Image: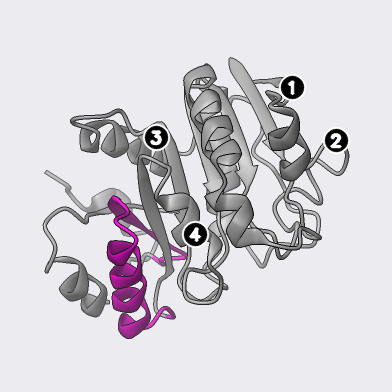
Amino acid sequence: MSAYFDALHRRPNVAVFARAPQAARQLPIRAPRLVPGEMPLEYARLREKLMLAGSQRPLRALVFAGCEGGEGCTRVTREFAEMLASSGLKTLLVEADLQTSGLTSSIAPGGADLAEVVAAGRTPPSVPWGLGQLAVVASSPSHPDKERFFRASEFAAWLEDQRQRHDYVLLDAPPLLRFAEGGLVSRLCDGVVIVVHAGATKRESLVRAREQLERAEANIVGVVLNRARDQIPALLRPYLSTG
């Protein structure tokens, strides 16, 4: 996996933030959710690194996106949002993918979609989650002009308003190299986190995704290495020193 780090180390402002928790198996159609109050260590570390990375402006509005698809970005984004809410924060989870509704189809099947809440200038309702609150906004898969939608001043104003009303606003974007949404919304957010699939995402794809975001003048704040496997047998781990 050194290829990932070779590509990233060319830019000192891009860091590998965390490994995502390893899923026990392939996600079913109805994705299992974290239990309120559950806070995997990997996501707690991700939040700490994001807090350290935000020097001039707090990183509160963040885009999560993969390169070509299949990286598990949706699961990472959803679970990170649930962890933030569990810890006592007011969190908004937005499905910024006008192609599908994979994020919200199983966790928020009803309610107004993204185009509707933006048009009305509404703040989506939150529900208690752990010690905090969580709001979820579904995508608008039938929207005829996604480029105009994400470039419109109404969307920018709505997003900034939500940034002021929530501790974190997380946007789950489609693959950067396949669709335009990730690059469009990244200009309006505090940063972008790229999700890669350990052992599967190609180095060339990661480099192209980074260059695409740089052309969009996005702030690339780090990478989440998803589905990474620990090569050390579980029986031996207690005997290894990390000091």
Residue 189 drawn at (x, y percent) = 41, 42
**Quadrant of the drawing holding the N terminus:** bottom left
Q: Is residue 157 above or below residue 212?
A: above
Which amino acid lies under the numbered mark 2 shown in the image of this protein? Gly
Which amino acid lies under the numbered mark 4 shown in the image of this protein? Gly
Task: Measure the C-alpha gap from mark 2 to mark 1.
Answer: 9 Å
In the image, the segment drawn in magenta is 200-229
Crowd around label 4: few <14 · some 14–19 · many ≥20 (10 Å)? many
The tag earlier along the polypeptide, 2 or 1, is 2
In the structure shown, which secondary structural element does the residue marked by tag 1 occupy?
A: loop
In the structure shown, which secondary structural element does the residue marked by tag 4 occupy?
A: helix
Q: Identify the residue position indicated by label 3 in the image.
A: 44
Q: Is residue 210 above or below residue 90?
A: below
The tag earlier along the polypeptide, 4 or 1, is 1
Residue 185 in the magenta stretch? The answer is no
Residue 39 drawn at (x, y percent) = 50, 32
Q: Identify the residue position indicated by label 4 in the image.
A: 182
Which amino acid lies under the numbered mark 1 shown in the image of this protein? Pro
Residue 16 placement, left or right of 177: left
Are the residues flagged by discs 2 and 1 in contact, CB closer than 8 Å?
Answer: yes
Q: Residue 111 carries which label?
A: 2
Q: Identify the residue position indicated by label 1 in the image.
A: 125
